[in-house]
Image (cartoon, helix red, strand yellow):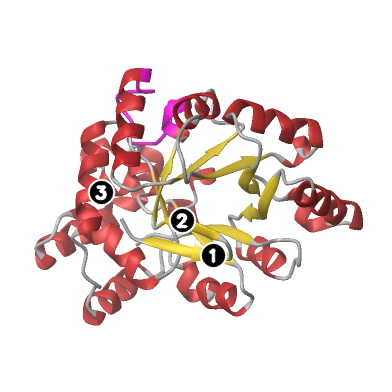
C-alpha cells in the first residue's frame, strides 16, 4: 500500500468508506447492508493489506460503533468522521469519539455545509478548542458544489476538503479544485469514484429516473473494451493518475469486492495522456442531475 504524508500524519492512499456497513447504501446495492461477519472480514482484510484510513459519519447507522470495535486495539489508524451542522457541538463530538473508542479523531468534517455560509468567530474558536484539547487533528468539509469548495478553500480553519471526483463528474479538473487545494496547503480526500456503484450497473438495471445516463454508460463500456482493462481499473486509475497525493475513498459490501479493488490498485500504472484526454472529451458535458446523487 502506498501512503501519503500530510503534516504529521501517514494516510493510506486508499481509504475504506463505511457507509455500506451501517446503511442499505448505494443505487446498485441489491444485497442490502452486509452482516457483521462480512463487515469484519472486509475490515480485517483491508487493515492486513495496509489500509490504515477509514471514513465514517454520524449518520451512517451503526458504522461508527462497528469501526470502533474493530479498531480499538489497532495501531497507526487514521479515522475520518463527518458531523451534521446542527450537531456541531462539543457533546456530539464527544459522542463520536465514544462510539469510535478514540481519545482523538484525526479528521472531523462537516457533512453538510450550512455553517460555511455564515462562518463566525465562534466557530473558529470551537475548532481552536477542539485542537487544543487534543480531540481532533484536522478540521474540514465534505463539499458538493463549487461554491462550497470556494468557501472551504478560503476558510483558514479548514485543513481538509473531501470532494466528489469520477469519470462522470469532472469538476475537480474543470474548476481546478486539486490545484487550488495544493496552492493553499489543504489536503484533498476524494469520494464517489464509483458514483455509488452506478458506473458498474448493467443498462437494464438503471432506473427510469436515470435513463439519461445510459448513453454515457455505453460509452464507458466501449472504453473498457478499447483499453482492454477492467472497469474497476479504468475508474480507479483515471482518478488516481490525475489526483496524485490525494487519498481515495472506496466502498464495498463484500470481501470479494475489497480484494478486487486492492489487487487492482496494487497493479496500477499511470494512465496514458491520450486515454485521459479521450475520457475528458467524452464525459465533460454530463448533466449534474446524473453525477449528483442528491438529485436522484
| Residue at 13% in and 60% down | 229
Along the viewing direction, whichever of 31 and 255 lies nearer the viewer: 255
How far apart, in angstroms, are the residues tagged by discs 2 and 3?
Answer: 15 Å
Along the viewing direction, whichever of 273 and 188 lies nearer the viewer: 188
Residue 213: which numbered mark, if any?
A: none
Can residue 218 be seen in the rendering of this structure?
no
Q: Label 1, secondary structure: give it.
A: strand
Residue 262: which numbered mark, if any?
A: 3
- Where is residue 165 drawn, in percent x and y? 44, 60
Task: Let me know if residue 58 is in the magenta part.
Answer: no
- Which residue does the numbered mark 1 point to in the structure image? 6
Along the viewing direction, whichever of 211 and 75 lies nearer the viewer: 75
Farthest right residue in view: 121
Q: How crowded is mark 2: few (under 14 residues within 10 Å), some or many (20 or more)?
A: many
Residue 11: which numbered mark, if any?
A: 2
Query: Is residue 226 toward the left or the right of residue 184 in the image?
Result: left
| Residue at 36% in and 26% down | 39
| Residue at 35% in and 64% down | 239
- Where is residue 147 drawn, in percent x and y? 67, 64
Q: Which of marks 3 and 1 is nearer the N terminus?
A: 1
**Residues drawn in magenta:** 20-36
Query: Is residue 261 toward the left or the right of residue 73 in the image?
Result: left
How far apart, in angstroms, are the residues tagged by discs 3 and 1?
Answer: 22 Å
The answer to whether marks 1 and 2 mark residues whose Cβ atoms lie closer than 8 Å is yes
Residue 48: image quadrant is top left
Can residue 291 be seen in the rendering of this structure?
yes
Q: Earlier in the sequence, mark 2 or mark 3?
A: 2
Q: Label 2, secondary structure: give it.
A: strand
Along the viewing direction, whichever of 273 and 210 lies nearer the viewer: 273
Amino acid at each position: 500500500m502506498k501512503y501519503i504524508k500530510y503534516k504529521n500524519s501517514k494516510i493510506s492512499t486508499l481509504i475504506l468508506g463505511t457507509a455500506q456497513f451501517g446503511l442499505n447504501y448505494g443505487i446498485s446495492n441489491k444485497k442490502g447492508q452486509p452482516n457483521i461477519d462480512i463487515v469484519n472480514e472486509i475490515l480485517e482484510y483491508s487493515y492486513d493489506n495496509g489500509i490504515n484510513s477509514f471514513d465514517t459519519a454520524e449518520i451512517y447507522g451503526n458504522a461508527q460503533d462497528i469501526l470502533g470495535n474493530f479498531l480499538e486495539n489497532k495501531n497507526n489508524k487514521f479515522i475520518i468522521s463527518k458531523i451534521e451542522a446542527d450537531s456541531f457541538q462539543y457533546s456530539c463530538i464527544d459522542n463520536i469519539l465514544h462510539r469510535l473508542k478514540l481519545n482523538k479523531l484525526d479528521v472531523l468534517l462537516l457533512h453538510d455545509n450550512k455553517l460555511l455560509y455564515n462562518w463566525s468567530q465562534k466557530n473558529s474558536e470551537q475548532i481552536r478548542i477542539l485542537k487544543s484539547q487534543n480531540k481532533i487533528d484536522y478540521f474540514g468539509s465534505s463539499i458538493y458544489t463549487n461554491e462550497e469548495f470556494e468557501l472551504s478553500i478560503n476558510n483558514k480553519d479548514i485543513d481538509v476538503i473531501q470532494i466528489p471526483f469520477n469519470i462522470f463528474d469532472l469538476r475537480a479538473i474543470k474548476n481546478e479544485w486539486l490545484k487550488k487545494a495544493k496552492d493553499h496547503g489543504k489536503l484533498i480526500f476524494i469520494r464517489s469514484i464509483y458514483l455509488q456503484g452506478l458506473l458498474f450497473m448493467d443498462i437494464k438495471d438503471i432506473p427510469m429516473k436515470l435513463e439519461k445516463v445510459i448513453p454515457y454508460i455505453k460509452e464507458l463500456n466501449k472504453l473498457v473494451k478499447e483499453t482492454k482493462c477492467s472497469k474497476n481499473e479504468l475508474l480507479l486509475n483515471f482518478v488516481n493518475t490525475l489526483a496524485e497525493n490525494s487519498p481515495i475513498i472506496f466502498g464495498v459490501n463484500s470481501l470479494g469486492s475489497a480484494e478486487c479493488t486492492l489487487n487492482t490498485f496494487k497493479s496500477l500504472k499511470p494512465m496514458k495522456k491520450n486515454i485521459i484526454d479521450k475520457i475528458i472529451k467524452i464525459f465533460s458535458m454530463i448533466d449534474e442531475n446524473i453525477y449528483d446523487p442528491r438529485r436522484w
